[in-house]
Image (tube, rainbow, N blue to C red):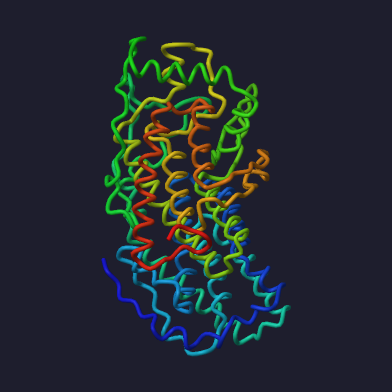
Amino acid sequence: MKYSIHLACLAFAALAGRPAHAHNPQLAEILDPAKALNIINMTMVHDVVSPPVAARYYAYTTMGAYCIVAAHNKSVPDLPLLVKSFGALRLDTVKARYDYQIAAYYSLLETARLLLPSGETLAEEEADLLKKLAQQGTRPDVLAQSVRVGKLASAAVVRFSKTDHYAQLSALKRYTPRKEEGSWYPTPPAYLDPVEPNWKTMRPLVIDSASAFRPAPCAPFSKDTASAFYRLAKQVYTVSTHLSAEQNQIAQFWDCNPFAVNTAGHMSIGFKKISPGGHWMNIAALTARQAKVGFDKTVVVLCAEGITLMDAFISCWDAKYLTNRIRPETYINRYMSVRWQPLLQTPPFPEYTSGHAVVSTASAEVLTYLLGDHLAYTDNTEIPFGSGERKFTSFRQAAAEASISRLYGGIHYIDSATNGNAQGKQIGEFIVARLRGSGVKPLAGGRK
């Protein structure tokens, strides 16, 4: 379904020249998009949002803010040039003056409030934001109109989100794990139900379809000790039982399991962490801040990354339930060692391809285009979750480490990472081509 869009008259209503807080460091700090992202991240962690669903939320929560920025900053192309079928945003009825950056920041929180399971808790964050802005001298009429614009943008994005088939997932045929050899089956300790088996029915935002970037065929299942599949499983077993301290740290750093269950006697204890998409959204925010690209370009980076995550997960999940491949934990326990356990808890969905490989590599391609190929940074995303920080010389180096971490963790075979990298690179390159074609240029040392 196509929507009409009317943005041409929006800029005249914005405050003349630069935003009111352009020369106010306190206001600039209050309106740092990374702060809004962190609030959204922690809300998702609380809600235990699964990786593909989290990616959907990241895409939509950033789209309204992007549209508001694009309407004011003519160097930022309109979102319909990038996102297929999008065009529901109409703001040309706004006649009063407002601060477009306040409106964009508010839209980040408001869209999350409307979409997330615990979104209503964000009403307090919105109220706190408005209180701080008022204390910094923002005029009440400007503040009120900025909120109005933010809400208009959020409402338009939410309307658009309702057409992506998410609401229909629960009505689709229930997925039943198959017990036959070679097929995925729930793993200990919780034996959780499979995550989003019908995710391939979701509407992508940029790529043409869930099946557009299917990976190379995986090695066929076999119990034969001379087979390629047995060697893949043997490699997981061998590597996992001889991990170096560095490999252990890498596996833990990139765990990103939204809900792991540990058992102690008769007790089961759940541990919440950020999702893989949340990790890469935080990387996007912290590197944009490090590159000092400013508010508008940071919103562009976050929106591009959110869109990449959503489409990458749709593509990856199509492959996972198409191949329905057995996890190393199940295979090794059945055919090699009944006592073996992976370092990381096996996620509740089929093995091929590795979501970390697909999503990380796609993200690295998009962020490299926007922010450059040699942006060294320290990733502190996992500090709140007990895994410290790591230093990287580029996004691609980080993506390669995220991919191999799944072998170290004992939850993926190496071909799932290797072919997942290829799949992610194709998705990332496709989105970069769309960014370039729509007029989104490199923002800070990115590729021309």
Assign the N terminus to one quadrant of the image: bottom left
Assign the C terminus to one quadrant of the image: bottom left
| 162 sits left or right of 42 in the view | left
Which of the 4 image quadrants contains residue 382? top right
Q: Is residue 121 visible?
A: no
As drawn, 226 above or below 116: above
Which of the 4 image quadrants contains residue 241? top right
Q: Nearer the viewer, residue 375 or 3?
A: 375
Q: Is residue 378 visible?
A: yes
As drawn, 412 above or below 15: above
Task: Identify the residue shown where x is 64% and y is 85%.
Answer: 140
Which of the 4 image quadrants contains residue 74? bottom left
Q: Nearer the viewer, residue 120 or 90?
A: 90
x, y (%) of residue 24? 70, 77
As drawn, 118 above or below 147: above
x, y (%) of residue 222? 32, 16
| 285 sits left or right of 306 in the view | right
Q: Nearer the viewer, residue 307 or 171?
A: 307
x, y (%) of residue 385? 65, 42
Count of marks placed on residues = 0
x, y (%) of residue 394? 54, 47
As drawn, 19 above or below 86: below
Q: Nearer the viewer, residue 236 or 371?
A: 371
Task: Identify the residue shown where x is 27% and y is 47%.
Answer: 212
